[in-house]
Amino acid sequence: MQPGTAMLEALQEGSFAAAMRDSIWLYPAVETVHIIGFAILVGAVIMFDLRLLGVSKRVPVRMLAQHLLPWSVAALLLIVPAGFLMFSADATTLISNRAFVVKMVLLMLAATNAAAFHLGSFRSVQLWDLGVKAPRSARLHAAASLIIWLGVVTCGRMIAYV
Amino acid sequence: MKSLKLALLAAFMVALPAAAHHGWSSYDSDNAITITGTITEASYTYPHGTIMLETQGKTWLAVLAPPSRMSARGLPSSDLAVGAQATVQGYPSRQDPKEMRAERITINGKTIELR
């Protein structure tokens, strides 16, 4: 038995998890909320990353960041609880699903990458807000972010098929 | 950044030979089987329903479809009654010799497509 299995079983036996399994509409509804949430989040991430990579240069980077960040945070408030509910319905199976595990690893990489960007290259954003190419480090963070998030979506979809 | 890319590559390489318990690639689609038996257990739950199907000398776990789909296609939970006769056509699991993924199920003379 893996460590943590008991915890996963307890989660799976909870009333929310049971409702997720038994209700005819709850699981698809939660799945839909999850998708609407990550459409906003991943959309925002991709738009910002593309800007750093040189697309839509007429939009100031800081203005774009200020616009997209609150939406991203709001989207997370939909995505994370919805995802957790879906996970709870089938926790013991999902934890050994490779696509799920890779997705979680990629999410951690994405968070680390975003944090490193905000604490690093983004601090000098006033120097490359408009009319100047983003520095190489910022572009690398953006490229990594793009790849990671496409991986997250792919792995999320693959959970049902591996 | 180099280490990040390496980690990413490693993550995908781990993912490639993925073969989880209930999946898609983990069923042998070159080897269609038909099993008739008696339902001894049934679950009508998300992410997918299942039945235990008892045949002579072997009890199969047949993975069905999400309840919403089964319901929409005319297979209510009441049809998956313990003791009922059912025939499933589908593909055996590559990992578990007692598990199969049902593509269709025939129950009470009615055949329901599950995919």
Image: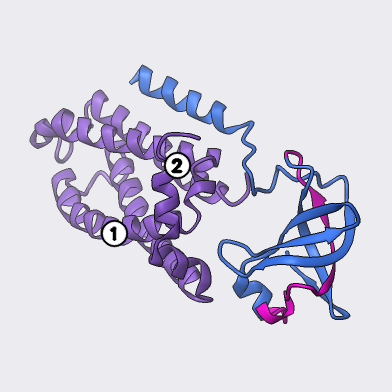
Q: Nearer the viewer, residue A96 or B9?
A: A96
Task: Give residue B108's position: percent from left, percent from top.
Answer: 85, 80
| Residue range of the region highlighted in magenta in the rendering | B72-95
The amino acid beneath tag 1 is Ala
Task: Give residue B86's position: percent from left, percent from top.
Answer: 84, 70
Q: Is residue A84 above or below residue A109?
A: below
Is residue A162 visible in the rendered image? The answer is: yes
- B73 inside magenta stretch: yes
Task: Give residue A55's position: percent from left, percent from top.
Answer: 32, 43
Q: Tell me where residue A119 sits by quadrant.
A: top left
Q: Is residue B75 above or below residue A12?
A: below
Q: Tell me where residue A6 sits by quadrant.
A: top left
The chain under label 2 reads: A
**Callout 2 secondary element:** helix
The chain under label 1 reads: A
Colour seen for chain A: purple
Q: Quadrant of the N terminus of chain B?
A: top left
The amino acid beneath tag 2 is Thr
- The residue to which callout 2 is attached is A5
Q: Compare marks 2 and 1 and give the one earlier in the sequence.
A: 2
Compute the Cα span from label 2 to label 1: 30 Å
- The residue to which callout 1 is attached is A75
Q: Is residue A14 left or right of residue A123?
A: right
